Image (spheres, grey):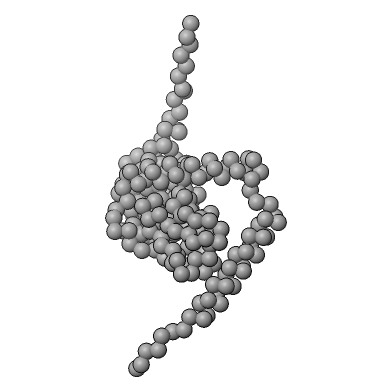
């Protein structure tokens, strides 16, 4: 005799899932949470629905409809909604420190230690999380020239979830760097930064007659 089991319905989880589906999956953290899913969970607990600049008015309207709350103005203290931008790394100044790779929530940056890094523009969500850790300020945002689509959001969420599983797996196996490895990496970054600064200092400004 075959026993068929069915999953117990979980209305709360389903509601969070619908909220998450309405978010753009840029994983930027501007809302104050560590990604779109945590923000969806916070909204389900009563958090404000107007804290997603990348989603703009469309996302705000969807969240209002799902929660039954009124549409309110976007919280401008978190940034304004605008066209999609993507990160670009200046190859001339990249020192191969991998800090931007570590910061990218969707694995949109490729490269290796002491090697040139590059952003895969088609995968970049425009989250800007790679900019603060860059020690040589070689990352800038530029217009993507296209709109962020629902398919982009689905793909970005899948990459973000895969990255989170990988990070968790490494932590469970004790694969995260120990203190000596972290110090070694910090020294390597400091050395590379010193070389980059020296290189920048040696670049002369072209003479421009008045």
Q: Is residue 128 left or right of residue 142?
A: right
Question: Which is more toward the observer, 58 or 28?
Answer: 28
Instruction: Name the spot of residue 45 as percent of width and height, x first.
Output: 47, 41
Which residue is at 38% across, 43% downward? 155
Which residue is at 40% across, 89% downward? 207
Q: Is residue 141 visible?
A: yes
88 lies above or below 72: below
Q: Is residue 92 left or right of residue 62?
A: right
Instruction: Name the spot of residue 68 as percent of width and height, x first.
Output: 34, 40
In the picture, the quarter occupied by the C terminus is bottom left
Residue 67: image quadrant is: top left
94 lies above or below 3: below
Q: Which residue of the protein is positioned furthest toward the bottom in this rendering?
A: 210
Question: Which is more toward the observer, 172 or 118?
Answer: 118
Which residue is at 70% across, 55% downward? 179
26 lies above or below 45: below
Instruction: Name the spot of residue 101 as percent of width and height, x first.
Output: 51, 55
Q: How many marks?
A: 0
Q: Which residue of the protein is positioned furthest toward the right in this rendering?
A: 180
Q: Which residue of the protein is positioned furthest toward the top in this rendering?
A: 1
193 lies above or below 179: below
Instruction: Name the spot of residue 13 as percent of width and height, x first.
Output: 45, 33
Q: Is residue 39 visible?
A: no
Which residue is at 58% across, 42% downward? 168
């Amino acid at each position: 005799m075959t026993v068929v089991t069915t999953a117990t319905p979980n209305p709360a989880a389903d509601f969070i899932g619908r909220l998450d589906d309405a978010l753009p999956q840029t994983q930027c953290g501007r809302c104050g949470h560590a990604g779109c899913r945590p923000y969806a969970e916070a909204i389900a607990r009563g958090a404000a629905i107007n804290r997603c600049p990348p989603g703009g008015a469309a996302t705000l309207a969807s969240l209002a409809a799902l929660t039954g709350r009124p549409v309110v103005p976007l919280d401008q203290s978190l940034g304004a909604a605008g066209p999609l931008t993507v990160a670009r790394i200046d190859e001339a100044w990249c020192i191969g420190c991998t800090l931007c790779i570590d910061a990218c929530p969707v694995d949109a940056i490729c490269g290796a230690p002491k090697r040139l890094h590059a952003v895969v523009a088609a995968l970049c969500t425009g989250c800007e999380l790679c900019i603060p850790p860059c020690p040589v300020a070689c990352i800038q945002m530029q217009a993507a020239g296209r709109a962020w689509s629902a398919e982009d959001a689905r793909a970005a969420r899948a990459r973000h979830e895969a990255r989170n599983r990988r990070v968790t797996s490494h932590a469970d196996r004790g694969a995260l760097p120990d203190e000596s490895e972290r110090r070694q990496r910090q020294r390597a970054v400091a050395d590379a930064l010193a070389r980059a600064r020296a290189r920048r200092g040696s670049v002369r400004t072209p003479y421009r007659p008045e």
